Image (cartoon, grey):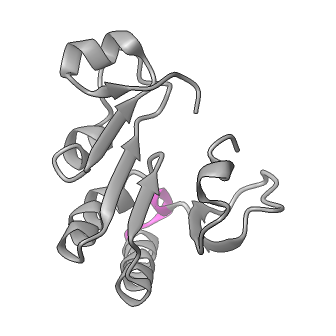
Amino acid sequence: MELKDAWEPYDHTILTYVSDRPLDGMGELMLVYPPWKSVTRCLWTLSKALLKILFDKPDVVLSTGMGYVDMFAFPFCKLLGAYTVYIESAANVDHLSGTGNVVRRFADRFLVQWEELADKIGAEYKGGAF
């Protein structure tokens, strides 16, 4: 992970989906199951994430996209006073994802990974392939 240096010196928790990818050396993890298999799993994952945010009260929330979790978590984080940063997926070359369209309204910083897309929608561009 290339963003690791940004959060490594700070107390942090990484919320990510359970998968086969290696997660060694990432610090505290909160693993959730992908929600698209059932409504129950979707609600469980969302409530788990929101409770973590409520009890940890983070100063900063950085996301590279967790779909529906971000759609609810970003407004919730703003209500708690957290500074929010969203980095849109590099896969979105000429348009925003559905999540990006929603989260953009609540993010203090909204970055995209394609300069042409940044120019088109007025977002920040600091380089690609984060």
Residue 32 in the image: state x and y as whole percent: 57, 70
Mainly helix, strand or loop, the magenta region?
Answer: helix
Indicate whether 100 appears above or below 19. above
The stretch in magenta equals 35-39
The answer to whether residue 49 is left or right of residue 118 is right
Q: Position of residue 111 (x, y in %)?
A: 37, 34
Quadrant position of the N terminus in the picture? top right
Residue 88 on image: x %, y %: 41, 35
Q: Considering the image in quadrants, where does the C terminus appear?
A: top right
Any part of residue 32 in sight: no
User: Toward the viewer: 90 or 56?
Assistant: 56
The residue at 41%/23% (across/down) is: 92
Residue at (43%, 75%) from the top-left corner? 49
Height in image: 126 above or below 3?
Answer: above
Q: Quadrant of residue 74?
A: bottom left
Q: Quadrant of residue 16?
A: bottom right
Residue extending farthest to the top is 116
- Towards the viewer: 106 or 96: 106
Is residue 121 a member of the stretch shown in magenta? no
Which of these two is toward me, 82 or 50? 82
In x, y percent, where is residue 104?
A: 22, 43
**Which residue occupies the foreground of this view, 8 or 114?**
8
Residue in the picture at 26% in, 27% down = 123
With 50 as the anchor, is 23 left or right in this view?
Answer: right
User: Viewed as shown, does residue 64 lie left or right of 53?
Assistant: right
